[in-house]
Amino acid sequence: MAIDSLNLEDLRAAAAEIDRCAYNHEQWFDALIGTLICGLPPDKRDLCEDAHHRCRLGQWYFSGNEVTTALSKRPGFRELGMEHERMHTHTRKMLRAFADGEDIPHREYQAFISALKNLRMEIATLRQDIDDSLYAIDPLTGVPGRAHMLPRLREYQALVERGVQTCCLAMMDLDDFKVINDRFGHPAGDQVLVSFARHIGQNLRPYDAVFRYGGEEFLIILPDTTDSDGLAVIDRLCDALAQVPHLVGADDPVYVTASFGLAGLQVGIPVERSIDRADKALYAAKAAGKNCSVLWENSMNNDA
């Protein structure tokens, strides 16, 4: 799971935790300087071989929870851990020299400062990545918006070009959504969109991804999936969504369906063209009566 697959709540929690870790790290640094300059008692944890596991940042970094697992897929996360461990290694050496009444070697101090600067740079970069992802999240539905969609598709397109895996995408549009807005009001329509986004995530596989394409349209990426397998996945999703009750102010629950158009990523075909193919298949699904999924075929246009 990549960083852009984290939901809005997880991203905000990660940002808050990184801020806490950064604050605690500054407090730790102030205490370390107090030890080395003023002779204050050191934090005994800093003398342990696994000191980089014991501080607040280390506890979070090595927690292995869903958020840190997702963040570990981004470039630089491993380097953050390496610089953090290196900083604590040199801290331990400086504290031991200080405790033995020895001068701290200048090379040890320089290595510590280098690791400290690199660690702060990696923390700041990770925090910026999370801010960028938060900006790209659709604030209503909590799923990524179009800003992250094309980069993700191009990553899968590169794998398709290399013959590493197949990938299928699906364009989804809620059926008769204007009726919901007109009958119950736009807040009710927003409620339906939020519910749909949540249920899409619950009914897809862990490695699939959904993006809000615009309005009541969503785009779903199904990696490592053939066209026929993708159609089976989307058929199940289509059936599941049609059975979700929406309480939007009516006496009885309202049921909303969706139509889907699918197209596979193909060698030599730009992702924008694949999206267009999925969109044409979506129109075919609407024409076929809605609440169904249709796979793109050459006959739908002459761009094959």
Image (tube, rainbow, N blue to C red):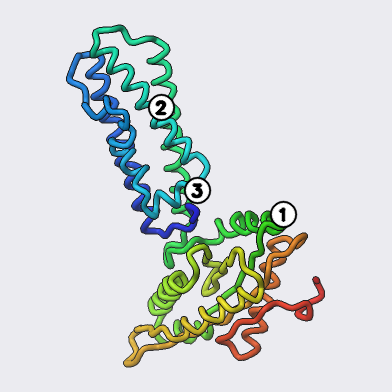
152 up-or-down from 227: above or below: above
Total labels drawn: 3
Q: Secondary structure at mark 2?
A: helix
Kindly check if marks 2 and 1 are in contact, taking CB atoms under 8 A apart as contact: no
* Mark 3 vs mark 2, CA separation in Å: 21 Å
Instruction: In this rendered view, identify the residue nearer to me: 98 or 202.
Output: 98
Find residue 86 and name its label.
Answer: 2
Residue where numbered disc 3 is placed: 73
What's the residue type where badge 1 is placed?
Answer: Arg
Residue 272 horizontal side relative to residue 171, left or right = right
What's the residue type where badge 3 is placed?
Answer: Lys
Q: Secondary structure at mark 1?
A: loop
For the residue carrying disc 2, how many other residues have a C-alpha within 10 Å: few (<14), some (14-19), or many (20+)?
some
42 up-or-down from 27: above or below: above
Q: Secondary structure at mark 3?
A: loop
Instruction: In this rendered view, identify the residue nearer to me: 100 or 293.
Output: 100
For the residue carrying disc 1, how many other residues have a C-alpha within 10 Å: few (<14), some (14-19), or many (20+)?
few
Where is residue 242 shown, x and y percent of the image? 47, 85
Residue where numbered disc 1 is placed: 162
Residue 162 horizontal side relative to residue 131, left or right = right
Q: Earlier in the sequence, mark 3 or mark 2?
A: 3
Where is residue 281 shown, x and y percent of the image? 67, 78
Residue 219 horizontal side relative to residue 196, left or right = right
